[in-house]
């Protein structure tokens, strides 16, 4: 059994106990795992303006600029800014060359996640397993080297135009990958500001086509040896007009968790249909950022101008909610003031809140999550949440 910190977690001064709490990390014997996954490596975004998106993630989400690639470093195709917060790494790419594939992708999908890169101990083993299970290999295993060492990497295809790069950086000490240089920002945080507002990535949700959720659940089970987590949702989270189905798969150590959604038939267009229409196909819907103080995080984000989905006051005054959630670490009024949702299961509870879409299209958004024992995803909140989402959809004229 191994329950070790990744390098990124160690650098972020996280400890195991904290991670067990933050993201529900569990012990896992990787010696019999056909596709061992250490954890997340990076979330790679294509955006319309990486220079300004980087500023947004630094100023609003309190991330630190750590590395860069662009024309000045010999990359004439695009800008790429590497940002970090705790163990989380984002890479933001924006086209410079008018013929850049980054721009083509952006024309089709808008701002979005192109690569959910995973850190693995053995790239070749993973690719052999993926190939044997019929996965599409986008990049064969290969080494890339610079003065900081060697990274072994490959990439496989997943839903839509999304990929999983598989990265072994155990022989590399550079700031990100060969081709990138270390870079920091002159941006100053106000006095007394938190060092960071989130520490780890909890889960990445994929929206897939109608009727294909089980196929993708099966993909992660067969190809990556992921297992189903208990929580799944069908008709029971449909509102009268909008419905989805959802199942969750996770890596052995639960560091990597992928809920997968498909739209379900309902009277009106579901939020998943809206995503599929505006993203131009399947893709990553939301990223859940784990924080150990969601109240401070939400206060910071609101002060930075970030907008969240509104939760009706009736959610908090409903006696059924108080009955369902019992005691949590703060008075419910504190949660109500900030619109934070609560869910409880047999293992504990969680606090969560969802932002509005972060780009121009009604597609990708963030969740902030603070776990206290619960390994769930907020199933009990879906009804309250969807009603809030539908109000937003109606305001955009898409409902
Ligand atoms: Fe979520």
Image (tube, rainbow, N blue to C red):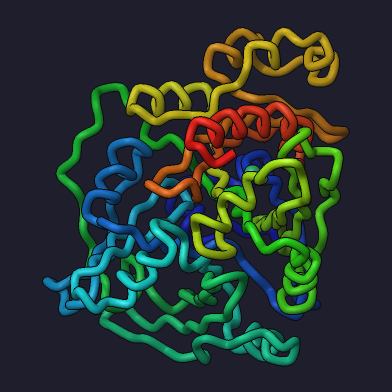
Where the C terminus falls, by quadrant?
top right
Q: Is residue 275 visible?
A: yes
Is residue 317 found left or right of 144 in the rendered image?
right
Res 186 quadrant in image: top left
Residue 282 spot, x, y in % from top left: 59, 64
Give the answer, above or below, for where 91 lies relative to 160.
above
Is residue 35 found left or right of 6 in the rendered image?
right
Is residue 281 found left or right of 149 in the rendered image?
right
Q: Which of 28 and 265 is in front in this view?
A: 265
Please name the residue shown 78% across and 50% down the image: 265
Q: Nearer the viewer, residue 250 or 17?
A: 250
Res 344 quadrant in image: top right
Farthest-out residue, left? 72
Residue 126 spot, x, y in % from top left: 65, 83
Residue 249 spot, x, y in % from top left: 75, 60
Where the N terminus falls, by quadrant?
bottom right
Is residue 265 found left or right of 84 in the rendered image?
right
Residue 299 spot, x, y in % from top left: 43, 21
Q: Which of 114 and 199 is in front in this view?
A: 114
Give the answer, above or below, for where 366 lies relative to 281.
above
Please name the residue shown 30% across and 22% down the image: 192
Quarter of the image where ligand 1 sits = top right
Q: Can residue 1 be seen in this view?
A: no
Please name the residue shown 56% across and 62% down the image: 283
Give the answer, above or below, for where 396 lies relative to 67.
above
Please name the residue shown 74% across and 31% down the image: 383
Q: How many labels does the image show?
A: 0
């Amino acid at each position: 059994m191994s329950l070790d910190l990744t390098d990124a977690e160690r650098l972020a001064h996280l400890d195991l106990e904290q991670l067990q709490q933050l993201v529900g990390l569990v012990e896992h014997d990787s010696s019999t795992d056909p596709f061992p996954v250490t954890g997340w490596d990076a979330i790679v975004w294509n955006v319309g303006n990486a220079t300004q998106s980087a500023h947004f993630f630094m100023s609003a989400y309190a991330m630190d600029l750590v590395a860069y690639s662009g024309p000045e470093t010999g990359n004439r195709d695009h800008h790429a800014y590497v940002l970090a917060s705790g163990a989380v790494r984002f890479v933001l790419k924006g086209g410079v060359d008018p013929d850049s594939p980054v721009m083509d992708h952006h024309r089709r999908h808008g701002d979005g996640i192109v690569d959910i890169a995973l850190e693995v101990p053995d790239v070749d083993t993973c690719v052999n397993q993926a190939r044997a299970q019929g996965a599409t290999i986008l990049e064969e295993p290969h080494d890339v080297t610079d003065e900081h060492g060697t990274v072994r990497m490959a990439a496989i295809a997943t839903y839509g135009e999304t990929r999983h790069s598989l990265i072994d950086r155990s022989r590399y000490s550079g700031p990100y990958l060969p081709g990138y240089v270390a870079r920091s920002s002159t941006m100053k945080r106000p006095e007394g500001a938190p060092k960071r507002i989130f520490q780890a990535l909890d889960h990445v949700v994929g929206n897939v086509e109608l009727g294909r959720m089980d196929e993708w659940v099966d993909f992660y089970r067969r190809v990556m040896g992921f297992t189903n987590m208990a929580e799944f949702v069908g008709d029971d989270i449909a509102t009268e007009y909008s419905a989805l189905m959802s199942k969750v798969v996770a890596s052995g150590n639960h560091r990597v968790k992928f809920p997968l959604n498909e739209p379900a038939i309902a009277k009106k267009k579901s939020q998943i249909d809206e995503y599929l229409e505006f993203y131009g196909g399947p893709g990553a819907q939301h990223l859940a950022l784990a924080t150990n103080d969601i109240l401070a995080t939400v206060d910071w984000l609101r002060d930075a101008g970030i907008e969240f989905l509104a939760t009706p006051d009736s959610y908090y005054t409903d006696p059924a909610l108080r009955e369902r959630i019992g005691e949590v670490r703060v008075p419910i009024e504190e949660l109500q003031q900030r619109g934070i949702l609560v869910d409880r299961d047999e293992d504990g509870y969680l606090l969560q809140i969802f932002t509005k879409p972060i780009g121009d299209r009604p597609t990708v958004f963030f969740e902030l999550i603070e776990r206290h024992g619960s390994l769930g995803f907020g199933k009990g909140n879906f009804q309250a949440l969807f009603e809030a989402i539908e109000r937003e959809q109606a305001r955009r004229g898409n409902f």
